[in-house]
């Protein structure tokens, strides 16, 4: 009677092939994408002269950044795309908070 090995001590090559990611997500790539997205959002945010224009510039910059992130996911480095997406979401959250504070303190919706 033959016993099936437990796998703790492999008796031979794996029964199925092992596939490796050709471009694995790395911390450096995520940090690079996050830094680039932060600089991108700051540069666009500085174009705004008031809360409304700051918010709209941030929305436009974020949409462009996410489009770039989608291209990077498909054809480039997924780690950089992840960093771009995470920081863009954070930038949009900051812009939403600024709009909400202005709305709460001024009583008037600042975006139109």
Image: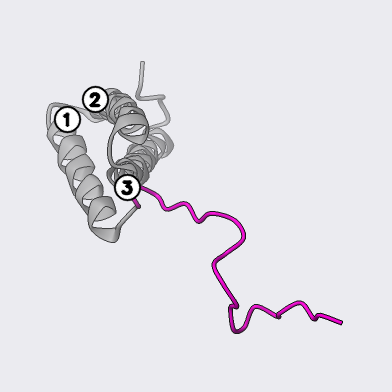
Residue at the top extreme, as displayed: 112
Q: Is residue 13 above or below residue 25?
A: below
Disc 2 + disc 1, Cβ < 8 Å: yes
Tell whether 67 sits left or right of 3.
left
Disc 1 + disc 3, Cβ < 8 Å: no
Depth check: give the residue in front, 51 or 80.
Answer: 80
Q: Is residue 111 above or below residue 8?
A: above
Residue 6 appears at what percent x and percent y?
70, 80
Tag in front: 1 or 3: 3
Depth check: give the residue in front, 29 or 55.
Answer: 29
Q: Residues within 10 Å of mark 1 (few under 14, many from 20)?
A: some
Helix, strand or loop at label 3? It is loop
Question: Separation of disc 2 and disc 3 at Cα?
Answer: 33 Å
The residue drawn where x is 28% and y is 41% is 77
Residue 39 quadrant: top left
Res. 84 mark: none
Q: Earlier in the sequence, mark 1 or mark 3?
A: 3
Res. 23 mark: 3
Tell whether 6 sits left or right of 33.
right
Res. 44 mark: 1
Q: Which residues are magenta?
A: 1-24
Q: Is residue 18 magenta?
A: yes
Q: Residue under circle 2?
A: 57
Residue 26 appears at what percent x and percent y?
30, 57
Asked which colour scheme the image uses, the reply is one colour
Helix, strand or loop at label 1? It is helix
Q: Earlier in the sequence, mark 2 or mark 3?
A: 3
Depth check: give the residue in front, 31 or 8.
Answer: 8
């Amino acid at each position: 009677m033959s016993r099936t090995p437990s796998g703790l001590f492999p008796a031979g090559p794996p029964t199925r092939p092992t596939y490796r990611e050709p471009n694995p997500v790395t911390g450096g790539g995520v940090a690079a994408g996050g830094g680039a997205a932060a600089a991108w959002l700051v540069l666009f945010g500085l174009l705004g002269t008031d809360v409304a224009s700051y918010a709209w510039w941030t929305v436009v910059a974020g949409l462009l950044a996410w489009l770039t992130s989608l291209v990077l996911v498909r054809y480039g480095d997924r780690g950089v795309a992840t960093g771009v997406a995470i920081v863009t979401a954070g930038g949009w959250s900051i812009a939403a908070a600024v709009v909400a504070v202005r709305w709460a303190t001024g009583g008037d919706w600042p975006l139109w």
